[in-house]
Amino acid sequence: MYSTDFEVLSTTLHWLEQRKRVVLITVVKTWGTAPRPVGALLAVREDGILVGSVSGGCVEEDIANRVQAGEFNGPTVLTYGVTTAQSQRVGLPCGGTIELLLEPLADIDSVKPAVTALEQRQLIARQLEIGTGLVTWQTAPTEQALHYDGQQLTSIYGPTWQLLIIGAGQISRYLSEFALALDYRIIICDPRQEYATTWQTKGTQLDNRMPDDAVKALVQDKRTAVVALTHDPKLDDLALLEALNSPAFYVGALGSMRNNEKRCNRLTTLGISETTLARLHAPVGLPIGSRTPPEIAIAILAEMTAVRNNV
């Protein structure tokens, strides 16, 4: 799940707590060039205020107008972009078609379990019976794709992707800014006061704990990446010792080939096996000839994205 989808669910819960009527919209199918993936969420309040997106075009405006008109009284399936004229009218890319499930909500229990689970970084499954509007919840042992068969919609909601950066230096600033654009939750760990006090990147969280303590506390699932950028073995090695044995989907460290060889020797001496050490991406980032801090940050994020997408 992306943080924007969590925002949709948490905002929906807030509106329901205010006794507002809300329609929750989920992308259940796409054909051709679709601007948003299956599972993307949009919520529209009774007065047309909305959060999230399903198209990035005029589909949202059309739905908001219909919600304000009180058109939806139960789960409803709508398809946009079937014809060229309709695609142009609602702003979809040429050839793009999306199928949406619109679900009027009145009960906070229709979304609250998801918000609670996501705040605790847990997986949860939400099943909607389309014919009756009945919603049931259950723990999801593994992350699975959305399932929709015309009669039931099962959505698996999981925690947002997060990036733990060790070190509050210049590369970290660019990496955090770029990663924010990709919807990561960013935590910067640096116990060094001279670095921490100058950190000013908005939308990030600063953690002053020692790196090993931060990794142990924050890396609880495979939706987390850890990148060590301090250039200080005393700090980077602490983080890597914990991160390499954690569920993190990506672990990287800055440094030259020579410095990385020394790092691997140190980690091996400290008990890290060759198999575990093979998880380390170092020198960190795709080999694009990067030299400047922005280029290095781009290379790191590109490699993270490739690993995350199993490329």
Image (cartoon, rainbow, N blue to C red):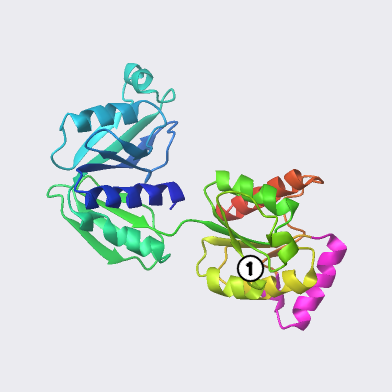
Location of mark 1 (residue): 208
Asked which secondary structure carries label 1, the reply is: loop
Q: Residue at x 68, y 50 (%)?
A: 173
Which residue is outermost to the top?
Answer: 85
* Residue 193 in the image: above or below residue 44: below
Q: Determine which quarter of the picture holds residue 54.
A: top left
- Name the residue type under label 1: Asn
Q: Measured from the top left, where is residue 117 in percent x and y? A: 35, 64
Range of residues picked out in magenta: 255-277
Q: Residue at x 84, y 71 (%)?
A: 262
In the displayed structure image, the side of residue 133 where residue 25 appears, left or right: right
Q: Nearer the viewer, residue 174 or 144?
A: 174
In the displayed structure image, the side of residue 256 where residue 230 appears, left or right: left
Q: Main secondary structure of the magenta part?
A: helix
Q: Measured from the top left, where is residue 41 in percent x and y? A: 35, 44
| In magenta segment, residue 271 | yes
Q: Measured from the top left, where is residue 265 in percent x and y? A: 81, 76
Q: Nearer the viewer, residue 31 or 229?
A: 229
Q: Nearer the viewer, residue 177 or 252?
A: 177
Q: Measured from the top left, where is residue 197 in percent x and y? A: 69, 59
Q: Determine which quarter of the picture holds residue 246.
A: bottom right
